[in-house]
Image: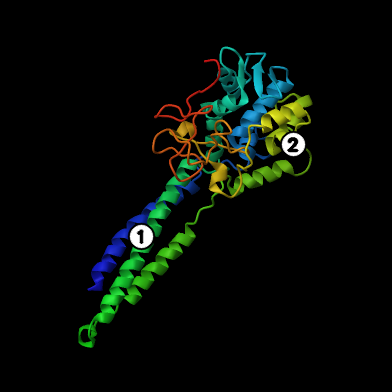
Amino acid sequence: MWHIEFYISLLLVVPAALWTSIAVQRVRRVPRPQGLPGRGIPLLDAAFLAGGPTRVVDVALVRMEREGRAVISRSGQVTITDPVARGSVEYAVINAAGRTRSCELKKLKPAVMQDTSVQEIGNRLADRGLMRRPELQRSARRARRMLWLSVLVTVVLGVVSLIVWAAQSEAEQAGRSGPFGAFAALLVVTLGFLTATRQRKERITPAGKRQLELMRQGSTWQPHGIDPAQAALLGAVALTGVAALEDDAIREALQARLVSSSFSGSSSSSSSTCSSTDSSSWCGASSNSCGSSSSSCGSSSSSCGSSSSSCGSSSSSSCGSSSSCGSSSSCGGGGGCGS
């Protein structure tokens, strides 16, 4: 009887579909909708929205350098000359530099990127509906993979049922419907559901894209609460990256540690994550790097953290601090210089 195979298919498809529906709704949910912040968005929020955690660190370093509170050499050495922080992100920069107040960019940047102060910016943007939380996106992808697996099993069971049905005699088939209609209907409904719940891979939402368009249109965007002499430059770095810098030495130093990828691109690897807890779930940006250039996010060769953490792919790999993975319970807990 083909009914047994059909019931097995239902038992596989229905729970997977429910899991997918719940996971997708969690991705789409906006906990604190407030509308678009417009051109009054804070500087570091704009940097995160446009380029992720790496862009935030770049903006913080450029601001400190422009204000004479840090020195960035062409070789990529950062020296803090004023240990008084203007905000939590700058405090993370100073703390990552360690007691010597000097650190290489390849070690300092991943430590600051994974700091709670930077991670909370992404969480705040996600709560407003401008970005999608990486851990929720991963959960939705897992649910959809399970549903696709259920579809594959359903196809196999349907084919087996058709073969068995065709092998029966006319007397045995008399008065009984074949399995084709039932299995076909189940597959059509399931595939339609998969199409309806298809997820975008980029982290930035349509609302986030509109927000960036508001800031890039019209006059040059200048963030509030910034020295007017530096506001235009910092705004340009936040929106377009370090390529906006005219200082060749600083631009080359900051670019030397980057790999070519885009945080707001369409691929999931371009918006990689480095998470083991909710406070450290964002990783990668315009550089898509979380660690040294030899240990970038998205590579399957570098991993640490718990099985729930990931770094730029559906696998559970994540980047550590500087050039190696940290402890087994977290991804890069500090990893600064001189500590």
Q: Position of residue 116 (x, y in %)?
A: 51, 27
In this rendered view, identify the residue nearer to me: 119 or 142.
142
Residue 275 seen in render: yes
Determine whether 186 is above or below 110 in the image. below
* Residue named by callout 2: 221
Q: To which quarter of the image does residue 43 belong?
A: top right
Residue 177 seen in render: no
- Helix, strand or loop at mark 1: helix
Type of colouring: rainbow
Which residue does the image show at 23% across and 87% down from the upper left?
Answer: 170
In this rendered view, identify the residue nearer to me: 255 or 329.
255
Q: Which mark is residue 223?
A: none
Q: Is residue 80 left or right of residue 195?
A: right
- Helix, strand or loop at mark 2: loop
Determine whether 34 is above or below 95 in the image. below
Residue type, mark 1 in image: Ser
Q: To which quarter of the image does residue 237 belong?
A: top right
- Label 1: how many Cα within 10 Å (few below 14, some 14–19, many 20+): many
Determine whether 263 is above or below 180 in the image. above
Q: Work out whether mark 2 precedes mark 1 in sequence or the reverse, and give the earlier one.
A: 1
* Residue named by callout 1: 150
Q: Position of residue 277 (x, y in %)?
A: 43, 33
Which residue does the image show at 55% across and 36% down from the upper left?
Answer: 296
Image label count? 2
- Label 2: how many Cα within 10 Å (few below 14, some 14–19, many 20+): many
Q: Position of residue 223 (x, y in %)?
A: 71, 31
Q: CA distance from mark 2 to mark 1?
A: 50 Å
